[in-house]
Amino acid sequence: MFDNLQIGNGILDLACGKGRNGLFLVSRNVPVLFADNNEAHLFSIPSKLELAGVSAKKSACWLIDFEAEVSAGRNPLMGKSFDAIIVFNYLHRPLFPFIREAIRPGGLVIYETFNVDQKNFGRPSNPDFLLGHDELTQTFAGWEFIRSFEGEVSNPQRAISRLIARKQAKK
């Protein structure tokens, strides 16, 4: 399962953690590449698929440290193409250009994480892990914004930025 990195018309669940979001998509018959640097979390995903009665053929797992790859001067997404990349509760700004590049024309980015107002509610409070106001819309300028949100949400109370945007199709 860790060898199939050729998923091209599927979803990359970047920094997937335990895979909650990608597991939902796989259960809807969408191919997902689960990517994270936590080996234990990744190794738990196939058994979760099995318990849910979902075919593991629609998914693959990729053990990767995105931050180390970027720090070493490498594009961890080089040569990969996705219908969508989803990112939740993770921020490493140097990945933004690689994410933009790896989404095929007409594909989507779905990004949600904490923003600077999160400091009012607790962790995280480090600015390296908090989006600035309008940072996602600026990062994906030129894309079609399908939905965006910045503000507070409850249960639990937190401050987030969320963006669903489509990369312009080639003409």
Image: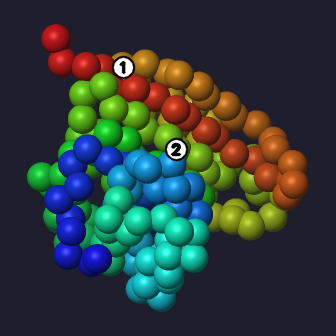
Taking the view exactly as shown, the residue that stands out farthest to the top is: 171
Q: Amino acid at mark 1?
A: Gly
Left or right: where 118 falls relative to 7: right
Left or right: where 65 falls relative to 46: left
Please give the name of the residue rendered at 55% of the width and 34% of the height, measured from the top-left corner. 163
Percent coordinates x, y for residue 135 in the rendering: 52, 36
Taking the view exactly as shown, the residue that stands out farthest to the bottom is: 40
Question: Callout 1: 10 Å neighbours few (<14), some, many (20+)?
Answer: few
Vertically, is 154 above or below 148? below
Q: Which mark is residue 142?
A: 1
Which is in the foreground here, disc 2 or disc 1? 2
Write down the residue under mark 2: 111
Going from N to C along the chain, the mark reached first, 2 or 1, is: 2
Percent coordinates x, y for residue 159 in the rendering: 75, 47
Left or right: where 10 falls relative to 24: left
Q: Quadrant of residue 95?
A: bottom left
Percent coordinates x, y for residue 45 in the rendering: 48, 76
Q: Quadrant of residue 61?
A: bottom left
Q: Secondary structure at mark 1?
A: loop
Q: Is residue 3 visible?
A: yes
Please give the name of the residue rendered at 59% of the width and 46% of the height, measured from the top-left corner. 112
State yes or no: discs 2 and 1 in contact (Cβ < 8 Å). no
Please give the name of the residue rendered at 23% of the width and 55% of the height, measured from the top-left corner. 7
State the quadrant of the N terminus.
bottom left
Q: Is residue 97 visible?
A: no
Vertically, is 154 above or below 145? below
Q: Secondary structure at mark 2?
A: strand
